[in-house]
Amino acid sequence: MAEKRPELSDAEWVVMKAVWRLKKTNVREVYEDLTHSHNWAYNTVRTMMERLREKGYLSAKKIGNTFFYQPRVSQRKISMGALERFADKVFNGAIGPIVAHLIQQDKLSDAEVEEIKRLLEEEEGES
């Protein structure tokens, strides 16, 4: 059975995206990475990263006087889980309305539309 983690807040998503981008990192690097987009204090970033560690999203290892953090879960896995929870909450688990909306609003690139077509054809072939 998959490990159940608490959902990420909007601010935690921002920090996790920075950690996924930076890979093995520390609070200072994440703080500096986010200063152009968020006016957060260093201690705010440190607190969020520690919370994410407590929630099981990050691992931490002390090297010298600095803690280095790494993601414990891939961005894809967390994103897909969030999408499934959204679909369950808003559309009673149906994904079709989400895909239809994205297509109708021109939110998908030509490459993404082609990939969806390929996946549908593949799925049809397996039926």
Image (tube, grey):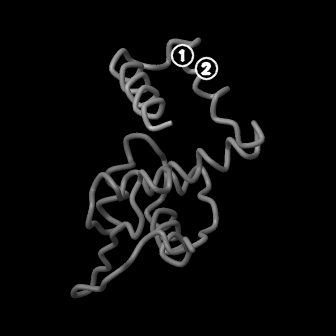
Disc 1 to disc 2: CB gap under 8 Å = yes
Q: Secondary structure at mark 1?
A: helix
Q: Quadrant of residue 25?
A: bottom left
Label number found at residue 100: 2
User: Counting other residues with Cα less than 10 Å from the Cα at mark 1, is it few (<14), some (14-19), or many (20 or more)?
Assistant: some
Residue found at x 58% / y 12%: 104
Q: Position of residue 48 (x, y in %)?
A: 52, 66
The kind of residue tagged 1 is Ile
Q: Relative to 106, is 89 above or below? A: below
Residue found at x 46% / y 28%: 120
User: Which residue position is annotated with label 1?
Assistant: 103
Residue found at x 36% / y 79%: 60
Q: CA distance from mark 1 to mark 2?
A: 5 Å
Residue at the extreme left: 64
Viewer-proximal residue, 123 or 67?
123
Q: Relative to 80, is 125 above or below? A: above
Q: Position of residue 77 (x, y in %)?
A: 46, 56
Viewer-proximal residue, 95 or 27?
95
Is residue 71 shown left or right of residue 66?
A: right
Q: Relative to 48, is 92 above or below? A: above
